[in-house]
Amino acid sequence: MTFRTAAAHKRYGGFVRVRSGRVNRLAVVLLRVSRRDLSCCLSALLLFCLGSVSYQLNGGSPKILLDVGYYIGRFADGYGSLAPRVLPFPSQVVYNRVGKCGSRTIVLLLRMLADRHQFTLVSSDIHNKTRLTKREQENLIQNISTTPQPFLYTRHVHFLNFSRFKTEEPVHINIIRDPISRFLSNYFFRRFGDWRGEENHVVRTPGMKEDERYLDINTCILESYPECTNPRLFYIIPYFCGQHPQCREPGLWALETAKQNVLDHYLLVGVLEELEDVLLLLERLLPHFFSDVLNIYRSPEYRKLGNLTGTVRKQSPNPEALRVLHQRMEYEYRFYQFIRAQFHQTKRKIGLKSGPQRLNIQEQTEDPLT
């Protein structure tokens, strides 16, 4: 029989106690791991069930699963990291051009720039559909977003809120002009056209009756013909307010909504009376699209083409008619002054110190207001 000394027994007992403690801690760890694994399994099962329900309800896989599958598939095919989905500069630009505010001038320049700088220019020829249904907005935004980048899309259309349809927001730009100047340009353009035809003017509204075509501008204003009163005079603000029906009602709500949209969504809104500074700012802010635009604008080749867009037979109303017109366009002028202030602030930030340029551009007209 073997006897252990007290010391040996103490050492042995201590050893047993140490081993017992380790076993107990290991059991606890295993128990905890088992609980965590169980939770993971239950979570995976729950996600699978939710995915199955979504598949049945929506007729297809949930978007997040499709996105994950897309990226995994791209990674597996390429055996490497994904290429960036966006270019390292603003590559999506939307110019929802306002009628009679220099848009034909800008579009003509853009056609020259697109060839030079290799970007996609989409210039819609739809002039008479600025207000869209929700489905039309969604379809148009989808079409714009799938254009090969870099692109610049331009059309006569009221502001489109891309974020409302969970689509990547493009860069927005625009140009406006003095509201009365814009109104007069449109008034005479609709009646007598411009210099782009073989004759000295092009008639844009062949169905217009003779008495309406030759209606004196002062008579139209002072006798409150529909063309010279609201809501027809409330024209610029809806281009920035958006697609809400209230945006077409002259009032403070539409004005403030338009101003907020400019602050939130527009990189630049210029004024036509300072067109050269507008072009210079566009060249500074969006060089991949507008680099060298000012030199092109000043070139003889462009001037020869640009001179064809001048409205013919344009007249100025008398002082009384101008006073009435200005009063009717109160909200339009409040918005115009806001835009001028923002534009001049941007000029100061960039470092431009040139004053307003009174170029001979008030005689230029672009696309008809319909």
Image (tube, grey):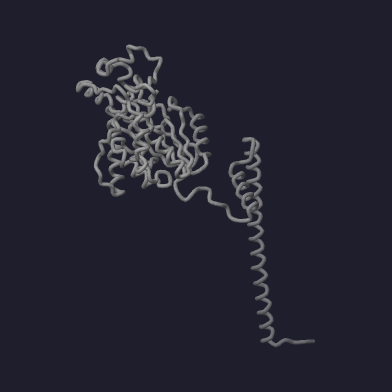
Of residue 281 and residue 229, the one placed in the foreground of this image is 281
Image quarter (top left, top right, bottom left or bottom right) of the C terminus: top left
Position of residue 53 relative to residue 29, above or below, is: above
- The answer to whether residue 299 of the structure is visible from this angle is yes
> With 246 as the anchor, is 75 left or right in this view?
right
Q: Residue at x 45, y 39 (%)?
A: 152
Say which quarter of the image contains residue 302: top left
- The answer to whether residue 43 of the structure is visible from this angle is no
Q: Position of residue 296 (x, y in %)?
A: 37, 41
Say which quarter of the image contains residue 110: top left
As drawn, which residue projects farthest toward the right? 1
Of residue 152 and residue 247, the one placed in the foreground of this image is 152
Position of residue 158 relative to residue 24, above or below, is: above
Of residue 47 and residue 185, the one placed in the foreground of this image is 185
Of residue 108 and residue 318, the one placed in the foreground of this image is 108
Position of residue 332 relative to residue 53, above or below, is: above
Q: Position of residue 143 (x, y in %)?
A: 52, 35
As drawn, which residue projects farthest toward the left? 319
Q: Position of residue 142 (x, y in %)?
A: 52, 36
Q: Residue at x 63, y 42 (%)?
A: 51
Q: Residue at x 80, y 87 (%)?
A: 1
Position of residue 340 relative to residue 204, above or below, is: below
Q: Position of residue 29 (x, y in %)?
A: 64, 64
